[in-house]
Amino acid sequence: MVAMLGLVGLVLWGADAPRQPTPAVDEPLVLLPEKVEAGQSVVVQTAEPSECVWQVQPAGTRWISGRGEQGSFVALLDLTPGRYFVSCVSFEKRRHQTLSIDVADTPHPPRPDPSGRFGLIKEAADWAAAAVPAEHRGQSRELARSFRAVQSAIVAGAIKDPAAILRETLASNNLALGSHIDAWRPWGIKLEARLSQLHRESKLRTPSDYAEAWGEIATGLDAVGGK
């Protein structure tokens, strides 16, 4: 069984500054999604397994990067309409590439059935109301965006292994919570116990299971609100 400790824990975040790249070549180094809608997160990944140092513009764009089974990826979080630039520097291949992403002003996709297959929508909201001090509950929206960002990476096939899913969730959640981590730790303990139970019952096994569960958690967090 995969250990589920630390969904809300120590801050694990950082990136190395890129060195001077060599000129780009014609072959694609990274692959862009066919469609990007406002209000969603988007995953960009390398065209073949390789390491990549990522940079995202404009400044202030929220993003995370990591490595999945298909290679390096970067997830741009909760995009608003506009143009974004993603740069990949591969020192292994001595190549770099910069591509633009245009996000149109389109409506948010409909939310899933509020009941939820795993029951995590209500539980995520109830745990926050019971265990998180009112003055820290406003961070629930940032935490919801974090779970949706990892969910997007799972759906895109960038993360498949449960251990990798939990590792990326840890990094993203800590970034989302910032100085509020301690206040949300009791909520994380309750979630960890519930996910462990689902795993024991063989209900949380495949990447699609995790994607659906993470979506339920995000929907429940959206309902929390707070100051």
Image: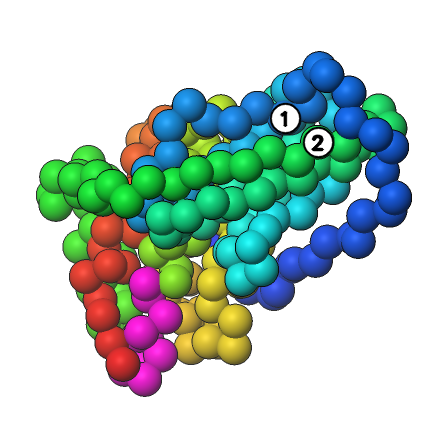
Residue 59: give x, y in percent of width and height: 58, 60
The quarter of the rendered structure image containing the C terminus is bottom left
Question: Which residue ends up furthest to the top in the rendered image?
Answer: 27
Marks 1 and 2: which is nearer the front? Answer: 2
| Residues at discs 1 and 2 in contact (Cβ within 8 Å) | yes
Which amino acid, mark 2?
Gln
The residues tagged by marks 1 and 2 sit, at their Cα atoms, a distance apart of: 7 Å
Which amino acid, mark 1?
Val
Please say which color scheme the image uses: rainbow
From the image, tell me which residue sits under label 1.
30
From the image, tell me which residue sits under label 2.
97
Residue drawn 11% across and 43% down? Answer: 115
Residue drawn 51% across and 45% down? Answer: 84
Residue drawn 66% across and 35% down? Answer: 98
Give neighbour class at mark 2: few <14, some 14-19, many 20+ (Cα, 10 Å): many
Q: Could you tell me if residue 164 is visible in this image?
A: no
User: Residue 112 lies in magenta, yes or no?
Assistant: no
User: Residue 135 lies in magenta, yes or no?
Assistant: yes
Region of the chain picked out in magenta, as a range: 132-141
